[in-house]
Image (cartoon, helix red, strand yellow):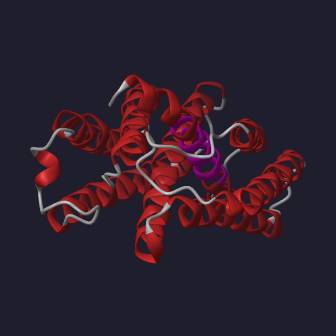
């Protein structure tokens, strides 16, 4: 990846990281509020973090370049406005949801509205940066699973800290979140294998593993997928036995690995047109 490509693609990579953090963390909060006894402090704090990530993503969206020769994917500027509107709605809903969770409200309608706005943001981004209807669908799936992984592991890492100050909190919230995270990362591994085998980005099957981008593809697989799958499973097992300090430490490691994998996946897509 040349210097010019890195310089132009960093804006898109940054947008992807921030949006997936925001959407995934908010989804985790909604699920935990409806299905567990997670504390209001944790729910409100994590929802506020999701709103902050969303706001940063909105600010970075305004500064996205219009595209150019070093961007390997199509850019549809006519979808910039709708995408930013959807992202702005998400931020507003997340702020209101933060207040609702702090007052111990279940707020299912707010949660649903926030998830719908996040889904619309992802769908519009995929439509604007995907190669045709098929490519847009695949990119939407990729952004969705990236959200579940990166936002989910962030929410899990924060939740692990809550057990240090709330020892009577049951293990159900962290077990649920760790199980969901493990499933999402496993889905990512399956998608990686399927997409590489099918050559969905236009190359021959398995060509990405030996081509000019092979080093980054292998790093995506080993550092960003296989390693987090093992660590997420370990966090689930330790959470089940209420070894919360161990689970939190594993989730700390998981945050770094999944974030690195997300950056690699985004860089390979925007810089090389590879969906991994």
**Main SS of the magenta segment?**
helix
Q: From where the camera sits, is residue 203 visible?
A: yes
| 130 w.r.t. 225: above or below | below
| 228 w.r.t. 202: above or below | above
Residue at 67%, 48% (x, y): give it.
38
Camera-side residue of 181 and 139: 139
Residue at 20%, 64% (x, y): give it.
199
Residue ranking furthest to the front = 69
Looking at the image, residue 41 sits to the left or right of residue 251; the answer is right
In which image quadrant can residue 93 be found?
bottom right
x and y percent of residue 99 in the render? 89, 47
Q: From where the camera sits, is residue 241 visible?
A: no
Camera-side residue of 248 and 135: 135
Instruction: Residue 19: say if magenta.
Output: yes
| 227 w.r.t. 72: above or below | above
x and y percent of residue 141 in the render? 45, 65
Residue at 43%, 58% (x, y): give it.
142
- Which stretch appears magenta? 13-26
x and y percent of residue 150 in the render? 49, 43
| 233 w.r.t. 122: above or below | above
x and y percent of residue 1 in the render? 32, 31
Looking at the image, residue 59 sits to the left or right of residue 163; the answer is right
Camera-side residue of 48 and 190: 190
Looking at the image, residue 227 sits to the left or right of residue 142; the answer is left
Instruction: Residue 62: say if magenta.
Output: no
Number of marks present in the image shown: 0
Looking at the image, residue 117 sits to the left or right of residue 125; the answer is right
């Amino acid at each position: 990846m040349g210097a010019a490509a890195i310089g132009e693609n960093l804006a898109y990579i940054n947008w992807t990281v921030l949006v997936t953090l925001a959407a995934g963390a908010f989804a985790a909060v909604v699920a935990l509020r409806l299905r567990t006894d997670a504390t209001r402090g944790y729910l409100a704090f994590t929802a506020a973090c999701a709103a902050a990530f969303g706001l940063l993503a909105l600010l970075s969206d305004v500064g996205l370049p219009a595209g150019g020769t070093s961007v390997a994917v199509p850019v549809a500027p006519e979808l910039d406005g709708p995408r930013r509107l959807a992202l702005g709605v998400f931020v507003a809903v997340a702020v209101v949801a933060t207040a609702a969770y702090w007052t111990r409200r279940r707020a299912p309608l707010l949660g649903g509205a926030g998830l719908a706005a996040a889904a619309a943001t992802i769908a519009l981004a995929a439509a604007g940066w995907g190669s045709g209807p098929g490519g847009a669908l695949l990119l939407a799936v990729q952004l969705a699973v990236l959200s579940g992984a990166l936002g989910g592991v962030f929410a899990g890492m924060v939740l692990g800290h809550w057990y240090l100050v709330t020892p009577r909190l049951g293990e159900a919230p962290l077990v649920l979140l760790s199980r969901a995270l493990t499933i999402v990362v496993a889905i990512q591994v399956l998608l990686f294998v399927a997409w590489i085998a099918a050559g969905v980005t236009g190359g021959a099957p398995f060509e990405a593993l030996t081509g000019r981008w092979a080093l980054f593809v292998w790093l995506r697989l080993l550092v960003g997928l296989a390693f987090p799958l093992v660590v997420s499973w370990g966090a689930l097992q330790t959470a089940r036995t209420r070894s919360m300090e161990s689970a939190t430490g594993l989730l700390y490691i998981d945050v770094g690995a999944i974030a690195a994998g997300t950056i690699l996946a985004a860089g390979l897509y925007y810089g090389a047109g590879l969906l991994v």
